Image (tube, coloured by chain):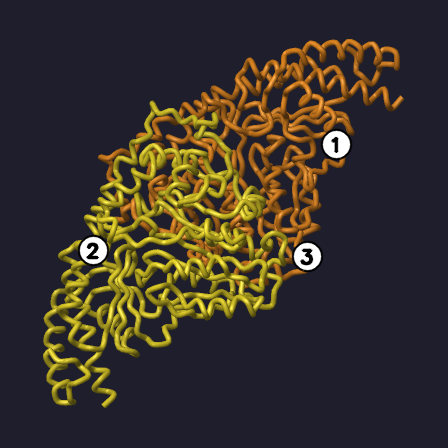
Chain colours: A orange, B yellow
């Protein structure tokens, strides 16, 4: 196939005709496939069924420090859970707080506290005329939704394979006091699957923001979510809190993680890592908010995983299930779309997504076309603040949830739609 | 023993001497007993051990509606959990939201939403010059702590056996637009153990507040927490939301409950009941806050309790453990203190507390004296906004946590301290 850009009007019209026929056939399949969210599939969930019975009536639910996990109390988590999550997050126990079932909820809570009460004695953000956040794009729609809900103005920062544009970030945070935060998914980013380079992390740690209450919201959602077994195929990232401490800037970062994509999504435990001063500030408010989070579930996870090795070996099982799906996407894109000369996509070694960049001005139409054929994708633009992808180009591919046969059909639909909408667009431009 | 009030100076001095000797002996016991919080005891926790294994690897975790509880999603709870909690709360399923492990956290979240975003389009409370809450006193310290954290001004409303002073409440809410809420524990109240009368509930439902965004925070924490098996010894209360609907005032109330004192405190499920419009308003914000709460734990509770009968029969087992403790307190107070003519206490038929009213100006000293002898009570004043009991009289007795032997010793300490501090006070007044 020649590059679409080399085709003349007649050739494009012939191609459009062929693609229309293909779409007709696909339509008759009456598909109903959902690739819209980064959800684990059934086989992945089945991996963790022993979690359900690891505690039973013979279990000792008394912690090392004497706490009965069945009763009230222990704000910030039991020591055993802190140990497990500390090793997983590469932080010290004293820098860890354990929360409930959702790291998104932890991020929301932390931001809400800053909004209502301020950070370490600073003016509550709700009292300010304007609060802005930097948003590396494309990024995670639920991060942006939190900002939108609070009326925080979002500023796009372009992403590249080494992370967000640090020149731009440094310029913004050092000059504008109303910039209070930045959303980061530093490893196997959502949706690109990029991992921040050493240089990027080092520059983050060394930021000198004009606003004393500027914070990096470091959502390390995919820290152990490798697609390959071989260590040399894993992305690596400098641990941010340690790096911040090294340059005497420990308070600048809040780091988030959870076990949600390690065992059961939404039934795991979430955690925050931050400096001692940040932890103190956060707990002061947290103690008003709740008596404590679910300690029985914390202990359940400790008994189940035992240690970091337990987590890592579980992730190998996930990788076995997920790798063929990611490889199928890449193989299909390569076969069907590489010659079109007009689209590109990322090739992550971990995480939950592949980022697809369609010809400018076509992403929305592609997603719509797929929906008409029964394949639901993440809304085009969802990965951008205000749902506004300025190029209308990015589509987030979430290959984890469907089984391999469904995925194959969905990719067939997707690639055909991409070609069809692209040809249509090219024709309309002639 | 004569009433302390009838004793002359010399008689009081003799009595003081005797009591000092008793205190000396008690001090030598080197006690370390904690009666400060309303925590279930070990035997109560042991009642629910089967909860831990009710789900195992053979469990079907697919809900009636096809939802896989192990995966993401379902904001507001699975239908099965809504059914269980709806029957427990005496509300319709469509009026129920299921949250995480803590009803206190639900209350906080609801108040925070009003603070940041407003209620049904009203001005966010954070934008107002003043926000006030009415606080029936004595009440629950953690309610008051939330108000204090947000800078909400609290106004004391006296409690009686039929509930808070409704004349006062009606006058306040109908005349002052800055009054936005009231904290209620309508059944077996904390700490008095009072249950609102039919008339009180009816008047609550018929409140006509000046502020359209005034809400009753109805914390039904002890709805099935009877101390006696016989139904005729149970307190009854009119279901508030239904009553509000009946008088076309459905949006005025938020109702809260949880399973925390039914199975494992802090590892249960919490719920909100509210009007359809309130639920819609709350979910609009909640969906930004989290993807969903722990559905596996919701299903675990549904499998374990099955239905309302399951909950009620579990409560009978709790009552068997708790009743002797409450009876011991009442018997001891009766024996040791009824003749003093100067103190009184409540005699609840459910809940977690007995409210003790010492001679004015002595509560702090009594609690301090008990602490010196190794018996930790709830801080005097804790049951009042700003920790300020204007009479310095109320002491919350929490008899659930210690075993019966410990409780006996603690009561010995307590009654001796009450007598000693009272005599001391009387002497200082002469």
Instruction: Report the residue marked by disc 1.
Output: A392
Residue at mark 3 to residue at mark 1: CA–CA distance: 28 Å
Instruction: Report the residue marked by disc 2.
Output: B402
Q: Which mark is residue B14?
A: none
Residue at mark 2 to residue at mark 1: CA–CA distance: 65 Å
Q: Residue at x 29, y 38 (%)?
A: B310
Instruction: Report the residue marked by disc 3.
Output: A130
Badge 1 local density, few (<14 within 10 Å), some, or many (20+)?
some
Q: Position of residue B82 (x, y in %)?
A: 43, 38
Badges 3 and 2: C-beta atoms under 8 Å apart?
no
Q: Is residue A280 above or below residue B156?
A: above
Give B216 or B100, whichever is nearer the viewer: B216
Q: Which is more foreground, mark 3 or mark 2?
A: 2
Badge 2 local density, few (<14 within 10 Å), some, or many (20+)?
some
Give A213 or A153, whichever is nearer the viewer: A153
Give B218 or A197, whichever is nearer the viewer: B218
Badges 3 and 1: C-beta atoms under 8 Å apart?
no
Residue at mark 3 to residue at mark 2: CA–CA distance: 53 Å
Question: Does residue A14 appear left or right of residue B58 in this picture?
Answer: right
């Amino acid at each position: 196939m020649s590059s679409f850009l080399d085709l003349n009007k007649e050739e494009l019209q012939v191609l459009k005709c062929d693609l229309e026929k293909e779409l007709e056939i696909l339509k008759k399949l009456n598909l109903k496939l959902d690739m819209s969210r980064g959800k684990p599939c059934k086989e992945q969930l089945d991996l963790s069924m022993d979690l359900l019975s690891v505690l039973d009536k013979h279990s000792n639910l008394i912690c090392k420090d004497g706490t009965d996990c069945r009763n009230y109390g222990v704000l910030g988590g039991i020591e055993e859970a802190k140990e497990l999550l500390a090793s997983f997050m590469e932080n010290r126990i004293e820098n860890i707080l354990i929360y409930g079932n959702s790291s998104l909820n932890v991020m929301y809570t932390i931001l809400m506290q800053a909004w209502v009460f301020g950070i370490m004695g600073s003016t509550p953000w709700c009292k300010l005329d304007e609060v802005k956040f930097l948003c590396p794009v494309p990024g995670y729609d639920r991060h942006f939704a939190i900002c939108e809900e609070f009326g925080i103005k979002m500023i796009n920062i372009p992403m590249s394979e080494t992370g967000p544009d640090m020149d731009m970030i440094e310029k913004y945070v050092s000059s504008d006091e109303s910039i209070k935060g930045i959303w980061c998914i530093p490893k196997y980013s959502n949706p690109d699957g990029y991992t921040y380079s050493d240089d990027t992390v080092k520059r983050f740690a060394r930021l000198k923001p004009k606003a004393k209450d500027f914070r990096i919201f470091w959502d390390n959602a995919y820290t152990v979510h490798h697609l390959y077994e071989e260590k040399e195929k894993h992305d690596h990232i400098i641990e941010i809190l340690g790096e911040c401490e090294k340059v005497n800037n420990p308070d600048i970062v809040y780091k988030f993680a959870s076990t949600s994509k390690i065992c059961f999504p939404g039934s795991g435990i979430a955690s925050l890592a931050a400096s001692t001063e940040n932890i103190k500030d956060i707990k002061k408010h947290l103690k008003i908010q709740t008596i404590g989070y679910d300690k029985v579930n914390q202990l359940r996870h400790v008994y189940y995983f035992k240690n970091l090795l337990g987590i890592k070996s579980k992730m190998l099982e996930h990788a076995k299930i997920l790798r063929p799906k990611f490889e199928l996407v890449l193989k299909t894109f390569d076969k069907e779309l590489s010659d079109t000369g007009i689209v590109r996509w990322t090739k992550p070694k971990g995480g939950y997504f592949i980022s697809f960049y369609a010809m400018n001005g076509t992403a929305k139409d592609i997603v719509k076309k797929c929906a008409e054929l029964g394949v639901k994708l993440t809304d085009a633009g969802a990965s951008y603040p205000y749902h506004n992808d300025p190029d209308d180009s990015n589509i987030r591919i979430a290959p984890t949830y469907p089984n391999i046969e469904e995925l194959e059909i969905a990719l067939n639909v997707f690639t055909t739609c991409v070609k069809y909408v692209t040809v249509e667009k090219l024709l309309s431009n002639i």
